[in-house]
Image: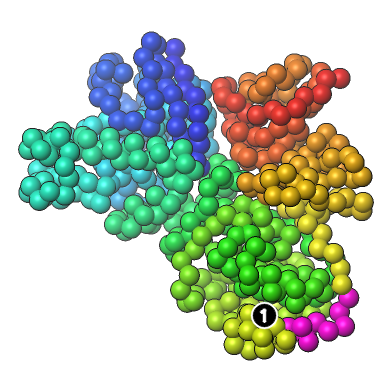
Amino acid sequence: MSRYEAQKRDGLARVGTYEEGEKSVSLPAALDTDALFPALRERSLSNVPLSADPAFVSNYFSPGEGQPVAVHPLAASAESGDCVLVANWHTALRNPRSYAAWLAGLKESVPPDTAWYAPASALPSTACLLVYSGFDLFDYRAVDLASAQKRFCMPEGEFSASLMESGVCGCEGCRDGNLRQHNRLALDRELALVRHYIEAGRLRELMEARCRVDAAQVGILRFLDRNHALMERFLPVVRAVPMLAATAESQNRAEVRRFADRVIERFVPTRTDVAVLLPCSARKPYSLSRSHRLFMNTVNRRAHELIVTSPLGLVPRELERIYPAGHYDVPVTGYWDREECAFIAGILARYFAAHPYRRVIAHLEGGALTVAEMAAEACGIDLEVTCEGHPTSPGSLRALNAALEGERRMQTDTIRGTVSWQFGTEINTKGLQIRGRSMQMAVLRGKQQLFSIDPGTGLFRPTFAGWDLIPEGYRVKIDAFIPQGDVLAPGITDCDPRIREGDEVLVEGPLAIATGRAMMGADEMLRSKRGIAVRVRKTQKF
C-alpha cells in the first residue's frame, strides 16, 4: 500500500511524504531507490522513449506491477497515492519545447496526490528545474555516471574532476579526494536548498537564478510560462514573501499575468472619468512613500490613480496592498528595454479598452512615459503629460494640480475594487467603511463586520454576513458532515474551478457552512484523495 501527501506547495513543486509499506521518505530527495523499489530492476517494457509514436507505445509500453507505476506522455494511468516513474526524462532536458508539452500532458492525466520519480535524471545542475517541474524523487545514477566519466558536479554545471583540487568545495568528499562522494553530496545539498526555497515560497527566484547557466533550461522555463493555464492553476493567489522580479523571465510569471488579467477583466474601478498615471515607488504599498504622499495630496481625489510599474503593468490605487502589488521588488535602473515596454504597454492598452476615460493624464517620465504613449497610440487616446522634469518637482506638481483644476472630487472605492478583483463580482458598497489601523483593519456596515483585512496579503476575509454580499463563486461543496478544524479533500463533492491556493472560500454542506482559506487549488481538491483542502476559521451549524 503506497501513499503520498503534500505538506507544502510552490507551484508544481511540493514538499511531502511518500510511504511504501512500512518505509517513509520525505520528499524531495535523492536515494538509492533499489531499496525502496526492489522489484524495479526486474521490470520490462517500461523504458519506452518519450518521443515514441502512439503505435509503438500502444504495442510495447507497460506500466508494470506494483510501485512505482510507469507513465508515458501517451500512456499515463495512475491512482492517488502511487509513485509514478517517467522513464528517460533526462532526454527531455535537451528539448525545451517537448519538455513543456510532455510535462503538461502528464500533469493533466496523473492524479495530483502522487509522487513523481525521474530516474537517472538528477544532477546538482538539473535538480532545481526537475523539482520546479513537479518531480519529487530521484536516484544517484546520473551523478554516479558523472563520477565514472571524471566529471565534477556543481549547481553551476559539470566540470573536469581536476576542479576538485582547486578548493571550490570543501565537502567531506573533496577533503578525502572522493569524487563519487562529492557528487552525491552536491546533489543532496542542492535538493536541501530547493526544499528550503519551496518552504519559503520562493522557488521561482531560485529557478530564475539556476537556469542562467544553461540555455536549454531558460528555454524550458519560457515554454512552461507560455502554458499559463497549467502553471497558474497550481500557483497560490498570495504569498507571505515579496516577489523578486530580477530577470527578463520575471514578467512572464503566472502571478504577474494573473494580476494583470484580473485588473483588466474583473476589477471595477472607482466611478470617475478622469485617470492619472503615476510612477511606482520603491516602498510598498506606494501610499507610504514620500513621492506618493505628494501625488495623493496634489490629485486630492479628483482622478482615478493608476500606478505604472514593471513587471505588473498597472496597479490601481485600490489594489496597492494586494499581493503581488504590495509585495514585489525590482532592480531600479531607470531603463526599460523594448520587450519590457511592449509588454507593459499591452497591459495598459487592454485596460483602457476595457475601462475608457474622458481624460488620461500621464504624470510620468522616462520609460514609464514611453509605455503610456505606446498604449495611448494603440487605443487612440489623447494623453496629457504633466511632468516638467522629475514627477515630484514643484513644477511638475503644479502642472498636475492645474490639469485637474475644476474636476469633481470622489472617494476612492477600495472595498468595491478589492472585492471585484478578489471574487470576480461587484457589490453595493453604500454604507460600508474600512475602519481600524495597520494590523487590525476591517470592513463594517455600522457595527456589523463584513470582512477582516489580512495585513500580510491585503485580501478580504469575509464573515458569514460578508459572504451574503457575494452572490456566487468561491464555494466549496462538502458531504453531510460538520467541519471540525480542516476540510480534507475526500469530503469535497464540488467546488468553483476558479479557486486557487490561498483564496478565501465558503464551505457549504447539508449540515453546516464554514468560512476559511483554500489550501489547494480547485483541480487538486477534486482529484485528490488525501490532504487538507480548506483551513477553516469558523463554522455555522444549521
For the residue pair 440 and 124, the one nearer the viewer reads as 440
Label 1 sits on residue:
363
Which picture quadrant has residue 302? bottom right
Q: Any magenta on residue 132?
A: no
- Residue 23, compared with residue 235, is above or below; it is above
Which residue is at a point 77% across and 83% down the rendered structure image? Answer: 401
Where is residue 485? Give x, y as percent. Answer: 67, 21
For the residue pair 179 and 432, the one nearer the viewer reads as 432
Which picture quadrant has residue 115? top left
Kindly state the secondary structure of the residue where label 1 is placed: loop
Q: How many other residues sit within 10 Å of disc 1, few (<14), some (14-19) or many (≥20)?
A: many
For the residue pair 255 and 294, the one nearer the viewer reads as 294
Which residue is at a point 65% across and 34% down the rendered structure image? Answer: 518
Where is residue 267? Give x, y as percent. Answer: 75, 58
What residue range appears in magenta? 400-408
Check the picture and name the quadrant holding the C terminus.
top right
Which residue is at a point 8% across and 35% down the rendered structure image? Answer: 176
Dot 1 amino acid type: His
* Drawn side of residue 35 relative to residue 527, left or right: left
* Drawn side of residue 406 relative to residue 251, left or right: right
